[in-house]
Structures are given as C-alpha cells and as structure tokens.
Image (cartoon, rainbow, N blue to C red):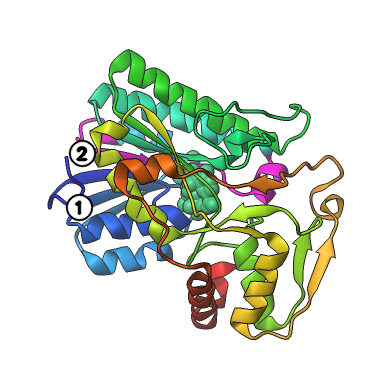
Amino acid sequence: MSAAQTGCRFLVTGGAGFIGSHLCESLIESGGHITVVDDLSTGRRSNLDAARMFGTNQLELIESTVSGALPSLAARRFDGIYHLAAAVGVRLVLDDPARAVETNIFETAAILSFAARTRTPLLFASSSEVYGKGVRAPFKEDDDLVFGAPTVSRWSYGLSKAIDEQLALAHAQRDGLPVVIARFFNTVGPRQRGRYGMVLPRFVAAAVTGAPLQVHGSGRQVRCFCDVRDVAAALPRLLDHAACHGRVFNVGGDRPVTVEDLAALVIRVTGSTSVIEHVPYAEVFGSAFEDLAIRVPDISRIRAEIGFEARISLERTIADLVTEHARTPEATA
Ligand SMILES: NC(=O)c1ccc[n+]([C@@H]2O[C@H](COP(=O)([O-])OP(=O)(O)OC[C@H]3O[C@@H](n4cnc5c(N)ncnc54)[C@H](O)[C@@H]3O)[C@@H](O)[C@H]2O)c1
C-alpha cells in the first residue's frame, strides 16, 4: 500500500505533537485521510493547523488517550498506523517516571493488539535512548542495549521504549503483523517545545531574547540533529516498503556536533549577543543524572533501504526556528 495513494486512511497516535503533526502534513499532502488520536498532554491542537490547510476534510482529531479511543475505532479499518504517542522529554520523564513508563508501555501494548487484530501495518516511534549508556559510535541497530541502574530515573524512558520494541517484534513474529521500528535520534525543527528539556528550542529562544544559552554539563556531548521534515517524510516510505517490515531503523542526521558548538552556531545564525553559560547537570536534573558523551547514529541501513538522506541543514532549521519564534514566541516555549 503506498502512502501516496489518494484515499488511504491512516491512524496517527500523538499526531498533534511535534513530529506527529509534520507526519500528518506529509500524509495529507500525499492524498491520505488521517485520524489523529492525541490526549494533548504535550501536543497542541494548533500544531495541526498546517495539516488542515492541505486538506480541509482529510483530518479528524480524537482528543483522547490511545487506549481510551480504541474501543470507538474497533469497527474502523486503516491502511497504516503510526504510533507516536508517548511521554517524551527528559524533564517530563524525570518529573514523573511512573507516568512515562505506564504511558509508553500500556498505550503501546493496546495499539499493537489493535493492529494485530485488524491486521494493520504499524510504525512504532522508538528512540536512540534505547541504546542507553552504550559507548559505540556510531550506534548500529543490532548493537546491545546497555542501561544504567533502575534507581536512575533517566533510563525509564529508554527501557520502556526497548520493551515496546520487543513487544512490536513479538507481534510481528507471532501474528505476522507488519511492523517497522524507527529509532529517532535528536529530531529538531518547527513546533518543538523547549519546556520538556529539548535543547534547540531552548537555545533559539534564549538567543533571540539575548538571554544566556545554558549548556548542561561540559558541552562536549556529541549529537546528530535531524530536521523533523526529513524525518516525517521518511516514515511513510519505511512503512510502505515491505522489505522494512519486522526491522529496526535508526533515523537521524549524520553531522556530529557538540552541544557547545550547537550553542555557538545558534548565536552565529541569529546574530545574537547572548553568551554561553555552563550549568552542571546536578543543578538541572539532580545528582544521579547520567548522560552520554556521544550519541550518533549509523544510518547506512535506512539509506540502503529507502535512500534516506537528511537534506535540511542545521543552519536552515535554526533560521526557521527564529522565524517561528518571531511569529509565535509561545510555539517553542
Ligand atoms: N523529538 C525527538 O527528538 C524524539 C527522539 C526520539 C524519539 N522520539 C519519539 O517520537 C515520538 C513523538 O515525539 P515528539 O518529539 O513529537 O513529542 P511530542 O510530545 O510532541 O509528541 C507526543 C504526542 O503524544 C501525545 N500523547 C502523550 N501521551 C498520550 C496518550 N497516552 N494518548 C494519546 N496521546 C498521547 C502528546 O500529547 C503529544 O502530542 C514519541 O514516541 C517519542 O518518544 C522523539
């Protein structure tokens, strides 16, 4: 089934969120009809305004948790499901790890059962956090997953996503469910919010208001950022391609950058007079916080299967965030 086929019906959980709303745009542009299920816990109705503009009658929003909405969808048939609903963001996870684990595991179990019952192909939004504190660079999809002690709340998010992956692959094996697991690395771009700990919207908001850019820790952490529009465009291609079913894919950029260099780049692109300020992790996240020195993806698998390339430069993403901030400062807050 091709996402480009006019009239296809897709269920997007978490579709009012940052990545989900861009995915909806991409699917609607290709002629699809979308049902979004989102409880608006971190997502926003307004994130879907652009998607609505592409196709006024092609988008329906059900404001609900995933498990709450599924009974009302029991008789409906979809051509594909994109499961993005999750508790996301370091801040959110540390503030309420129990909620993060419950949301990520129970809601995923519910949608996987629905997909298996209705035999609907499903793409699961996983995370580079499943690599935990692994030290390989770059991370390959078949690497071991290495987590810290369960007393360190930070790992609850990655652990819950790793369980979800296992569950999705178990459904693939037992029920023949076509599933694709997409492990997103640092995804950035318009509509991302800074309040849950995401670095780029925080930096841009600080730079344009002349406030210090707060770099947590040494700033020498290495990351690869990828624009959300590149990520969103890749997801239907992954789900459409039968050779991708039952497999895991890293989805990310291939330009490593330190967080300190990212801050300097934001200052340069915005022409800001802001300074960079280092803040110890302990001050921001508490004394037991652990972070990774290097987290970069090996993207050779996704490149080989669907020809994925990150086309939008970090400079352009930053410039677009500046424009967004000028138009609606609350969008990135
Ligand atoms: N942004 C990144 O860099 C990144 C990196 C790795 C993985 N991911 C994954 O990508 C997906 C989307 O993340 P995002 O960055 O767009 O975050 P987001 O917070 O903007 O999106 C998550 C959406 O899910 C919704 N939601 C949360 N709990 C729900 C529930 N129980 N029922 C229904 N809706 C619910 C939220 O309201 C929100 O709209 C998530 O699964 C996340 O784990 C994101």
The residue shown at (59%, 80%) is 269
Residue 82 placement: quadrant: top left
Neighbour tally class for label 1: few under 14, some 14-19, many 20 plus, Cα within 10 Å:
many
Q: Which mark is residue 32?
A: 1
Taking the magenta stretch, the answer to whether it contains residue 122 is no
Whether 92 is among the magenta residues is yes
Q: Position of residue 115 (x, y in %)?
A: 30, 28
Query: In what quadrant of the picture does the N terminus appear?
Result: top left
Residue 48's quadrant in the figure?
Answer: bottom left
Residue 242 picture location, percent across and down:
24, 33
**Mark 2 nearby-residue class (10 Å; few <14, some 14–19, many ≥20):** some
- Considering only order in the chain, which callout, 1 or 2, is on the residue closer to the N terminus? 1
The answer, for residue 181, to whether it is visible in the render is yes
* Residue type at the position of mark 2: Asp
- Distance between the Cα atoms at labels 2 and 1? 10 Å
Q: Which residue is mark 2?
A: 79
Look at the numbered disc 1 and give the secondary structure of its residue.
loop
Circles 2, 1 touching at the beta carbon (< 8 Å): yes
Residue drawn at (41%, 25%) of the image: 168
Taking the spot 62% from the left edge, 73% from the top edge, the residue there is: 204
Q: Which residues are magenta?
A: 73-96
